[in-house]
């Protein structure tokens, strides 16, 4: 299986994916990895034993049959998840390492096309970026780690006919520094990023900022020019988005949720929380609880541990994260469930 077997309609209309298309996609991907990937070959299941009649039922089936991987194993044995003899343009990426030791995962270059199509479609529908930035008008300055993120933001900006300054940053252990020593120490560590950002802002008229909440102050000197601010990471909540739009009066604040194995997901701010929606059918995210009868997907509005299914030709991962979130119903242009208010603090939900 390669991306030649993935429908082009997922690029043409990525927000119109139906549940039966997701189940069909999961069947093909799981069957392929059961045959080709060292980790999944250990399982003696037939694909028909793992699938349910709905996405919710399928996720519960996978978890309750033990068809998943523990985080520590995934981090130490990432090659077990690359199909043997896979024909594609594969690149291995590291996670940002802001919270813990860097993990390594891989993407096929073709996945970036599908991911960017989902991102652009959602950003246009929800935030009107195509109207704000007609071709040739977008001038972006983006902060972030090298790797998948650089590929994603580059292709996204180019899809608008825009121009991009990418300023890479060393993110290893930054969350701990932020929590223990504050923003000033983070900026001291990132001194080259600060200097190069100031240099660009003096010479070019940047109108889109892509950064993390602790770094947003670097753009305040050009606040009138900024027309969109894309944010993700620690501190991205509804209150902070409102603060950003007050400081940048001509800008929309756009929340994203990023992860090294699937990229960014687009968020929709509500009154209290931001709900994020995965890029079906490649990524499924549902909050779950462990009960006496096994895992179950929680009800809407209920908090649970994040169950994540990453299903692509080059990689299949099923896992339960050490992170909690609230199950959110379909909203905006999304026809499927999302998750709201993700938190690293894990309550007794296992």
Image (cartoon, helix red, strand yellow):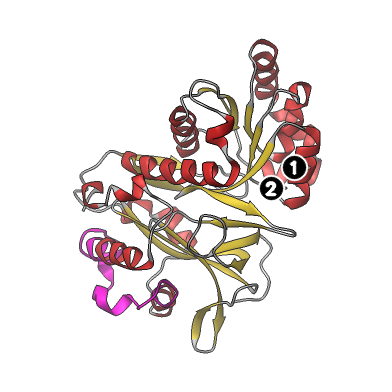
Left or right of residue 182, residue 317 in this image: left
The answer for how far apart the CA atoms under marks 1 and 2 are is 10 Å
Secondary element type, mark 2:
loop
Q: Quadrant of the C terminus?
A: bottom right
Who's the residue at 49% across and 30% down the image? 157
What number is the disc on residue 178? 1
Who's the residue at 44% across and 77% down the image? 60
Q: Residue 132: x, y in percent? A: 59, 31
- Which quarter of the picture shows residue 221? top right
Q: Is residue 55 magenta?
A: yes
The tag earlier along the polypeptide, 1 or 2, is 1
Give the main secondary structure of the magenta stretch: helix
The outermost residue toward the front is 131
Who's the residue at 54% across and 43% down the image? 123
Marks 2 and 1: in contact by CB < 8 Å?
yes
Vertical relation: 49 (above or below) 7: below
Q: Nearer the viewer, mark 1 or mark 2?
A: 2
Vertical relation: 163 (above or below) 319: above
What number is the disc on residue 32? none
Assess disc 2: are there few (<14), some (14-19) or many (≥20) residues with their C-alpha within 10 Å of its C-alpha: some
Left or right of residue 12, residue 31 in this image: left
Vertical relation: 310 (above or below) 123: below
* The magenta segment: 31-58
**184 vs 48, nearest the viewer:** 48
The outermost residue toward the bottom is 292
User: In this figure, which residue is indicated by the disc labeled 2?
Assistant: 234
- Which quarter of the picture shows residue 223? top right
Secondary element type, mark 1:
helix
Q: Residue 209: x, y in percent? A: 64, 30
Q: Residue 246: x, y in percent? A: 80, 37
């Amino acid at each position: 299986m390669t991306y030649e077997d993935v429908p082009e309609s997922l690029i043409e209309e990525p927000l119109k994916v139906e549940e039966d298309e997701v189940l069909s996609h999961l069947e093909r991907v799981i069957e392929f990895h059961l045959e080709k990937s060292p980790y999944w070959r250990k399982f003696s299941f037939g694909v028909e034993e793992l699938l349910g009649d709905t996405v919710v039922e399928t996720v519960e089936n996978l978890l309750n049959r033990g068809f998943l991987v523990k985080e520590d194993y995934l981090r130490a044995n990432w090659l077990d998840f690359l199909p043997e003899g896979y024909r594609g343009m594969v690149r291995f990426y590291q996670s940002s390492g802001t919270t813990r030791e860097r993990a390594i995962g891989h993407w096929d270059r073709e996945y970036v096309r599908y991911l960017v199509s989902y991102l652009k479609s959602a950003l246009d529908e929800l935030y009107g970026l195509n109207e704000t930035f007609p071709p040739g008008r977008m001038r972006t300055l983006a902060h972030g780690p090298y790797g998948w993120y650089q590929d994603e933001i580059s292709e996204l900006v180019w899809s608008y006919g825009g121009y991009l300054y990418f300023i890479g940053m060393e993110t290893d252990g930054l969350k701990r520094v932020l929590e223990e020593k504050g923003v000033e120490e983070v900026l001291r560590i990132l001194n080259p990023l600060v200097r190069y950002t100031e240099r660009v802002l003096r010479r070019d008229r940047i109108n889109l900022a892509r950064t993390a909440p602790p770094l947003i102050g670097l753009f305040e000197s050009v606040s009138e020019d900024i027309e969109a601010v894309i944010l993700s990471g620690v501190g991205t909540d509804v209150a902070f988005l409102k603060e950003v739009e007050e400081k940048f009066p001509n800008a929309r604040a756009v929340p994203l949720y990023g992860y090294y194995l699937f990229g960014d997901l687009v968020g929709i701010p509500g009154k209290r929380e931001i709900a994020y929606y995965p890029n079906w059918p490649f990524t499924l995210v549902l909050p779950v609880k462990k009960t006496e009868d096994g895992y179950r997907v929680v009800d809407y509005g209920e908090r649970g541990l994040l169950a994540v299914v990453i299903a692509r030709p080059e990689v299949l991962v099923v896992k339960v994260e050490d992170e909690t979130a609230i199950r959110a119903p379909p909203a905006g242009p999304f026809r499927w469930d999302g998750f709201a208010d993700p938190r690293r603090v894990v309550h007794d939900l296992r």
